[in-house]
Amino acid sequence: MNDFNEKLSSTPSYILAVETSCDETSVAVVKDGREVLSNLISSQIETHKAFGGVVPEVASRKHVEVITLMLEQAIEQSGIRPRDLSAIAVTQGPGLVGALLVGIVAAKTMAMALGKPLIGTHHIAGHIYANRLTHELQYPAMALVVSGGHTELVHMESEGKFKLIGRTRDDAVGEAYDKVARALGCPYPGGPHVDRMAAEAEQAVPLPRVWLEADSYDFSLSGLKSAVLNVLNQAKMRGETLEPSVVARGFQEAVVEVLVEKAVRAVREYGSRQLLLCGGVAANRGLRSALQERCAKEGLELLIPPMEYCTDNAAMIGAAAYLKWQRGEISEFDAKADPGLSLEAWSVQSL
């Protein structure tokens, strides 16, 4: 291991990364886990709009259609010759099993053809280490992960060591946003529409804050979603016209307040030096603004990735895979897609 680390420190590493966990196909080349040489993303939003949400079988087929060309283009744009790549990284889980499988087969094929190591990578570790593409991380750190399928608080005592201290007990934040958006008549994906309407509203419908137990870092959003539906149904029965933006603001304020308060409390309790905002919902302007204001007031350092690294992308997978690469932790070629891959179990070994 020492010989490996000495060799690694003297030569740059170039990781080709593949991300196909849901409805974005992405391929990137990342140098030393920090410098993005290329990062291509093919979105399927227009395809899935007709269905009001992601259809797993359709997503898998769309990945198959574009993955080969994107691999070629990502390498070409990076300026790196294929033989100079150090390793091939791929999202192994969590995600849609069919979509994950497309990426894993493509990554294995590239790794075998080029004679390069394979690194199965955790999708949420990627979202967390997207922050490392633009910031210097300090430990211990706390990550607030908010996406379509995940709402979690993750404590990192040291680099690449993950401990889950809180998670959603039902709907994830992004999922709740899409369901509320649908009730308000917004097209898929609904989250950006709710965020926009909330920013435009001058008033907010009062909605409950779901805190759960006093010492809990878990989240619950299904009750809040039901409260929104109840408000809309009551207004309809009374024959009243309820402005959608007022409901959107009430919903967003209820979500954001709980996320911010629990994240700040976790930072204090665990002695974290930084709070990292991660995941697709990190692009939400209301959440970003509230966290920035609160962290400035509390004297806490808040890291938020640029918008292009918030949603699913392969550059973040390359950044996370570097944690494994620099320790010589590579995957076997019989690695399988794992929709339930544990973040804690994926943690790196010590140097």
Image (cartoon, rainbow, N blue to C red):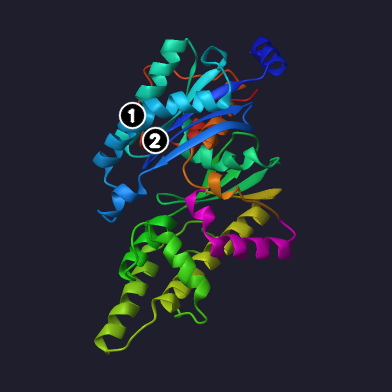
Counting from the top left corner in percent of width and height, residue 84 is at: 57, 14
Residues at circles 2 and 1 in contact by the CB criterion of under 8 Å: yes
Q: CA distance from mark 2 to mark 1?
A: 7 Å
Left or right? Give the position of 193 relative to 165: left
Label 2 packing within 10 angstroms: few (<14), some (14-19), many (20+)? many
- In the image, 277 versus 54, the foreground residue is 54
Tell me the residue at 43%/75% (across/down). 245
Q: Is residue 209 visible?
A: no
**What amino acid is at disc 1?**
Val
Which is more toward the observer, 318 or 218? 318
The residue under label 1 is 102
What residue is at 62 percent from the left and 22 percent from the top?
326
Which of 213/225 is in front? 225
Relative placement, left or right, of 282 versus 248 is right
Q: Tell me the quarter of the picture where residue 134 sits.
A: top right
Check the image and report above or below for 17 versus 225: above
Q: Which residues are magenta?
A: 279-300
